[in-house]
Image: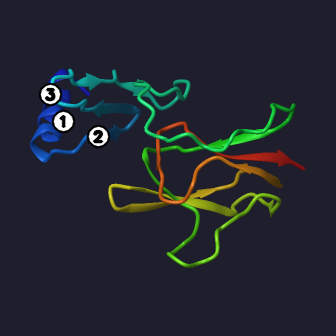
Amino acid sequence: MNISEIKELIQALIDSGVAELEVQRGENRVRIVRGAAGQELVVAAPVTVAAPQQPAVSAPVVPAAPAAPKPEEGLLTIKSPIVGTYYAAPSPGAADFVNVGDAVKPGKVLCIVESMKLMNEIECEVSGTIIAKHVDNGQPVEYGSALFTVRPS
């Protein structure tokens, strides 16, 4: 992405009234977050997909989550790969995909993160047991936010 494309994205963000925009083209990714009136517009520099997955802008939107368990060796934290809204179940009133204590296997759907009206299923990558859920249903999540802690088996 070049600077003119980024400027176009900023203008699109301003024109649409959206507070946040993240775009990936090939290996380039840019994330633009608009602050409140009077604050400056923050633009994250493009990064490649292979770069360490740290959020370019740290403006947490996630409210205080339940306390995480004390760190133990070998635990795996499953993080949100995108910004969006967390859903624990496939539809309102349905049972959650997983609960604390459930055994999981690779490919098991753990939750849905809705981003720009797209429902993205987040799947487990290891076999193990869910020992913590870090987000409540319907809450916003940031890129890299902890969703679950799994004890691999």
Which amino acid is tagged 2? Leu
Q: Position of residue 70 (x, y in %)?
A: 81, 33
Rendered image quadrant of residue 107 = bottom right
Q: Nearer the viewer, mark 3 or mark 2?
A: 2
Residue named by callout 3: 7
Q: Where residue 47 sits: x, y (%)?
A: 41, 24
Q: Secondary structure at mark 1?
A: helix
Q: Is residue 127 visible?
A: no
Task: Determine which residue is flagged by label 2.
Answer: 21
Q: Is residue 49 visible?
A: yes
Residue 124 in which image quadrant: bottom right
Mark pair 1, 2: CA separation: 8 Å
Q: Is residue 25 above or below residue 40?
A: below
State which mark lies toward you, 1 or 2. Answer: 2
What residue did someone put label 1 on? 9
Give the residue displayed 26% in from the left and 28% down from the top. Answer: 1
The reply to whether callout 1 and callout 2 are in contact (CB within 8 Å) is yes
Whichever of labels 1 and 2 marks the residue nearer the N terminus, that label is: 1
Residue depicted at x 55% and y 44%: 80
- Between 45 and 151, the one nearer to me in the picture: 151
> For mark 2, does the 10 Å Cα neighbourhood hold few (<14), some (14 to 19), or many (20 or more) residues?
some
Amino acid at circle 1: Leu
Q: Is residue 96 left or right of residue 140?
A: right
List the single residue furthest toward the right: 153
Disc 1 + disc 3, Cβ < 8 Å: yes
Q: Position of residue 63 (x, y in %)?
A: 50, 41
